[in-house]
Structures are given as C-alpha cells and as structure tokens.
Image (spheres, helix red, strand yellow):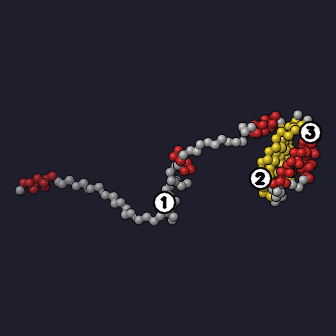
C-alpha cells in the first residue's frame, strides 16, 4: 500500500459550513476511488506568507490516505485545479519517514511543546545581558560621546571643582654659622 498526503488551502471568504463541505467533497472523492482515509487534519485559519488572489489568510486542510496505486492523484489534482474555492494545493507521496512523522504527530510526540517553569526575575541577571545600566557605548546614561553631560540628561547642579592642596614647601636649610652667632649674642 502506498501512502499519500494532500494539503489544500480553502478561500476564507466562504462560510464555515461551505469550507467544511469543500473539504468533505475531496474526502468523499478519495473514499469513492477505494482509498483508505488515515487522518483528516483541519489546521484552521492561518496567515499566508504572501497574498494569493488578494487574500492574506486561508483555511488549511491536510488529508492523509493510502491505497494500492496512484491513479487517483491525477483525478484529484484536476478537481482541485478546477475548484475556485481552493487557493493552493499540494499532493505528495509519503515515504516511510513521512508516515512515521505523521503517526508521531497524531500521537502528540511531535509539535506540542511542554511548558517549562518560568525563571524568576532574580535568576535572570541584568537586562539584555550587557551588564548594569549601560548603553551600547558602554558609558553611563548621563554622558554624551564627548564625555560631557548629554542633552537629555537631567540638569545637575554644578559642583565646584575639588581643589587639590599643594604639598607644603619644605623650609630651606639655614646656614649654620649665623645661627650660632645669634646664640652667642644672647
């Protein structure tokens, strides 16, 4: 038995009943030709990657089926091309990996991500991983590129520059002789 899959996009302008009737038409055609329907997946309304017939969204359907040969594919593709309700379609033959993938997807092993516990804000570290409250330039927010205050920085009181105290001058050595002379006079 050969496995096939047809995916088609139905025009979203149709009513909900018309959309389901369109999909059912092709499911019935596949059954009528003697193929076994394995799974019908209505993926629902999705946004298209690019506009098709001035539409930005479409209702997606995927039908997986198997049968003895591929005679149905030509008839099915012709019917899909002629139907104005179908915006796009794709028929493919599944290999053993495609069959296994679809089976795992139906069983919930693929496509559904288990929710992880959210990390608390304390464990995340800084915002953006750049460290601290620094901008891309690496400097604090209140400075511009030239090192002065930026235009958007809040006005600050100007501080008087700190006066650096000059070292105390060392006294010059006095001559030794006159000091002795003063002592003698007393």
Q: Secondary structure at mark 1?
A: loop
Q: How packed is label 3: few (under 14 Cα within 10 Å), some, or many (20 or more)?
A: few
Residue that label 2 marks = 45
Q: How packed is label 2: few (under 14 Cα within 10 Å), some, or many (20 or more)?
A: some
Q: Secondary structure at mark 3?
A: loop
CA gap, disc 2 to disc 3? 30 Å
Quadrant of the frame with the N terminus: top right
Mark found first going from the N terminus, 3 or 1: 3
* Tag 3 near tag 1, CB within 8 Å: no
Q: How packed is label 1: few (under 14 Cα within 10 Å), some, or many (20 or more)?
A: some
Which residue does the image show at 78% across and 57% down from the upper left?
56
Question: Which corner quadrant of the image does residue 32 belong to?
Answer: top right
* Tag 2 near tag 3, CB within 8 Å: no
In this image, 12 relative to 171: left or right?
right
CA gap, disc 1 to disc 2? 50 Å
**Residue 142: numbered disc:** 1
Residue that label 3 marks = 34
Q: Could you say where residue 119 lies in the image, as x and y percent from the top left?
A: 56, 44
Please say whether residue 49 is visible from this viewpoint.
no
Which residue does the image show at 64% across and 43% down from the upper left?
115
For discs 3 and 1, the disc positioned in front in the rendered view: 3
């Amino acid at each position: 038995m050969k496995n096939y899959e047809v995916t088609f996009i139905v025009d979203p302008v149709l009513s909900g009943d018309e959309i389901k009737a369109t999909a059912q038409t092709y499911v019935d055609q596949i059954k009528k030709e003697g193929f076994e329907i394995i799974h019908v997946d209505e993926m629902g309304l999705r946004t298209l990657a690019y506009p098709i017939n001035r539409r930005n969204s479409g209702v997606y359907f995927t039908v997986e089926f198997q049968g003895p040969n591929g005679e149905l594919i030509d008839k099915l593709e012709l019917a899909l091309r002629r139907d104005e309700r179908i915006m796009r379609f794709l028929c493919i033959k599944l290999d053993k990996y495609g069959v296994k993938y679809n089976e795992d997807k139906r069983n919930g092993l693929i496509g559904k991500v288990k929710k992880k516990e959210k990390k608390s804000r304390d464990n995340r570290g800084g915002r953006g991983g750049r460290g601290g409250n620094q901008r891309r330039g690496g400097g604090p927010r209140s400075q511009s590129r030239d090192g002065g205050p930026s235009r958007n920085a809040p006005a600050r009181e100007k501080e008087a520059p700190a006066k650096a105290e000059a070292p105390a001058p060392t006294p010059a050595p006095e001559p030794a002789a006159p000091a002795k002379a003063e002592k003698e006079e007393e």
